[in-house]
Image (cartoon, rainbow, N blue to C red):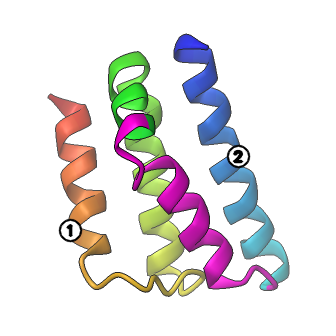
Amino acid sequence: HGPRGASELLETVDRLVAFAETTGRVAPSLLDALHAAYLGDEAVRAFLMDQNPQAAAAMAARFADARRRGLWHARRNDIDADLAALRAEAAE
């Protein structure tokens, strides 16, 4: 799937957050599940970082933006630190 596959995963996150922004009807559990599947899964996270670190950073930024805007109330207390660490790692 390569870099394009990573970009397509980012597009999924972007579209779900955009839908949440537009409708206010996206349950936090959906964003939790998407985060767990893409950034919480070590194999997927490694794929993103290897194939397209810019997409990984953009995905982390989009999740962080959803948090700042009150669209996502994550169940994990360390989510903000995790997203910041991923963005820093991707920038290296």
Residue 64 position by quadrant? bottom left
Q: Amino acid at mark 1?
A: Ala
> Where is residue 31, by image quadrant?
bottom right
Quadrant location of residue 68? bottom left
* Residue type marked 2: Thr
- Is 76 one of the magenta-colored residues? no
Give the image location of residue 24, x and y in percent: 78, 85
- Residue 60 placement, left or right of 13: left
Q: Are marks 2 and 1 in contact (CB under 8 Å)?
A: no
- Cα distance in 3D space between marks 2 and 1: 22 Å
**72 versus 11 height, above or below:** below
Task: Please report whichever mark, 2 or 1, sits nearer to the chain's N-terminal start.
Answer: 2
What is the x, y in percent for residue 36? 48, 61
The residue located at (70%, 46%) in the rendering is: 12
* Residue range highlighted in magenta: 25-43
**Element at badge 2?**
helix
Of residues 78 and 22, the one nearer the viewer is: 78
> Which disc is residue 12 wearing?
2
The chief SS type of the magenta part is helix
- Residue corresponding to mark 1: 81
What's the mark number on residue 57? none
Task: Report the residue at 62% width, 83% height from top.
Answer: 28
73 is higher (above) or lower (below) than 68: below
Structural crowding at the residue carrying mark 2, measured as other residues with C-alpha within 10 Å and reported as few (<14), some (14–19) or many (≥20) = few
Q: Is residue 32 left or right of residue 91?
A: right
Label 1: state its secondary structure.
helix
Residue ID at (18%, 44%): 88
Q: Between residues 82 and 58, which one lies in front from this camera angle?
A: 82
* Mark 1 crowd level (few <14, some 14–19, many ≥20, 10 Å Cα): few
Q: Is residue 11 above or below residue 66?
A: above
Quarter that holds the C terminus: top left
